[in-house]
């Protein structure tokens, strides 16, 4: 690990000033950044520890019905917050299906938004990786690609975004609050992540020194509270990143779908919103046939990036399963195995 400076600012302004210097990086829970430093993928000249800054750990239900969550709220605290879990149950289920309990206690909301891909070629400094070193190439093109992207990928990068929570936040139209050297700005989560193109590997779009201070969840997301689920297919239920995941939310009245949200994880460089499938379902009867057709539409643009055609079939099946699970209703208590397609019991883990 390289030698680096360490600073612990007490205000957002001081943090932004310190992080605007070349080679600086923010440190919160450290569950991703420290791993990257240990293997040589990241070598920051300065670590800016933001864990002592006040007002970044608050979970607030606002007067207009929106919710605001500070960037330093630990994943475990957010998932177990009774009001949040009741208003946005799919997001709570996504949080509890990610990582281990120890990591959820340390990992933060802001860090979850900024976590890097788990592509093995990104982590291997001996491999070419455009995301790690722009212009170096992509060794995944001729490598092991069974877990790589099936939507929105290019020859520049075929890595996937690893977050469980961000798929649910995409479905909820989350807005990310950012503060930086030029002031404050808000950005919709769908615009926060860029897909790869012919020259750019994509990823989160933050300028030097910018800090995520929190997110807002619009009140409209609460309309789905009674019919919202997050499901995840993984190599092992105990602790693994998603091969494919799906957040499905329904607003059903008299058997007709008034509104619907569908977002996928593990399929692209960003959480993937299936807007065409949503439009197809609105106004339709909530039936298995309608869900089958929507799943086909959600994956209509999918193409294998290598040895991963199975993920297209898997994603279609998971979208259908998530929609049917949402139609059955949000469990009164968190499932024993949050996010697992094998969970049937309605009890808290």
Image (spheres, rainbow, N blue to C red):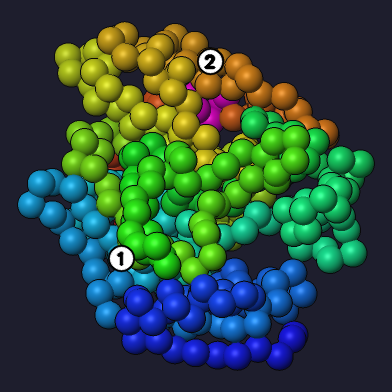
Residue 191 at x, y percent in the picture? 46, 40
Q: Identify the residue shown where x is 21% and y is 36%.
A: 220
Q: Earlier in the sequence, mark 1 or mark 2?
A: 1
Task: Give the distance between the C-alpha atoms of the residues marked 1 and 2, in whole angstroms.
Answer: 35 Å
**Residue 90, picture quadrant:** top left
Residue 94 at x, y percent in the picture? 43, 50
Is 279 on the left or on the right of 285, as rendered?
right
Q: Secondary structure at mark 1?
A: strand
Using the image, tell me which numbered label, if any, was put on residue 70. Answer: 1
Residue stretch in magenta: 316-321
**Which residue is at the front of the view, 248 or 154?**
154
Residue 305 at x, y percent in the picture? 78, 33
Does residue 287 appear anywhere in the picture? yes
Does residue 106 appear anywhere in the picture? no
Residue sitting farthest toward the front: 182
Q: Which residue is mark 2?
A: 297
Q: Is residue 296 magenta?
A: no
Residue 226 at x, y percent in the picture? 22, 36
Tell whether label 2 touches label 1 (CB within 8 Å). no
Establish if 54 lies above or below 131: below
Q: Callout 2 environment at 10 Å: few (<14), some (14 to 19), or many (20+)? A: some
Assign the N terminus to one quadrant of the image. bottom right
Magenta stretch, overall SS: helix
Using the image, tell me which numbered label, if any, was put on residue 260. Answer: none
Q: Identify the residue shown where x is 17% and y is 14%.
A: 254
Q: Identify the residue shown where x is 44% and y is 89%.
A: 8
Establish if 261 lies above or below 136: above
**Which residue is at the front of the view, 325 or 22?**
22
Establish if 274 lies above or below 288: below
Q: Secondary structure at mark 2?
A: helix
- Mark 1 or 2: the one toward you: 1
């Amino acid at each position: 690990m390289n030698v680096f400076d360490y600073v612990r600012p007490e205000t957002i302004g001081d943090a932004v000033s310190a992080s605007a210097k070349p080679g600086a990086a923010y440190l919160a829970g450290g569950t991703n950044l420290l791993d990257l430093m240990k293997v040589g993928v990241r070598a920051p000249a300065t670590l800016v520890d933001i864990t002592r800054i006040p007002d970044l750990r608050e979970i607030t239900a606002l007067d207009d019905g929106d919710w605001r969550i500070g960037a330093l709220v630990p994943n475990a605290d957010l998932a177990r917050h009774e009001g949040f879990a009741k208003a946005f149950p799919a997001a709570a289920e996504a949080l509890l299906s990610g990582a281990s309990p120890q990591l959820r206690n340390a990992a933060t909301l802001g860090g979850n938004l900024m976590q890097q891909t788990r592509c093995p070629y990104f982590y291997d400094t001996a491999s070419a990786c455009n995301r790690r070193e722009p212009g170096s190439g992509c060794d995944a093109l001729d490598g092991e690609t069974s877990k790589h992207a099936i939507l929105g990928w290019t020859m520049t990068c075929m890595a996937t975004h690893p977050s469980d929570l961000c798929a649910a936040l995409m479905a909820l139209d989350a807005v990310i609050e950012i503060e930086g050297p030029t002031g404050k700005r808000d950005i919709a989560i769908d615009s926060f992540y860029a897909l790869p193109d012919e020259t750019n590997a994509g990823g989160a779009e933050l300028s030097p020194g910018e800090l995520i201070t929190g997110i807002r969840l619009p009140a409209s997301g609460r309309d789905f509270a009674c019919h919202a689920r997050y499901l995840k297919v993984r190599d092992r239920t105990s602790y693994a990143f998603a091969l494919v995941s799906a957040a499905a939310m329904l607003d059903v009245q008299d058997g007709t779908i008034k509104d619907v949200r569908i977002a996928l994880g593990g399929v692209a460089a960003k959480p993937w919103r299936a807007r065409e499938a949503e439009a197809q379902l609105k106004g339709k009867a909530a039936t298995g046939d309608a869900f089958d057709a929507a799943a086909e539409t959600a994956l209509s643009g999918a193409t294998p990036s290598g040895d991963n055609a199975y993920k297209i079939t898997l994603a279609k099946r998971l979208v259908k399963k998530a929609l049917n699970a949402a139609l059955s209703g949000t469990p009164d208590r968190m499932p024993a195995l949050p996010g697992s397609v094998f969970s049937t019991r309605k009890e808290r883990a």
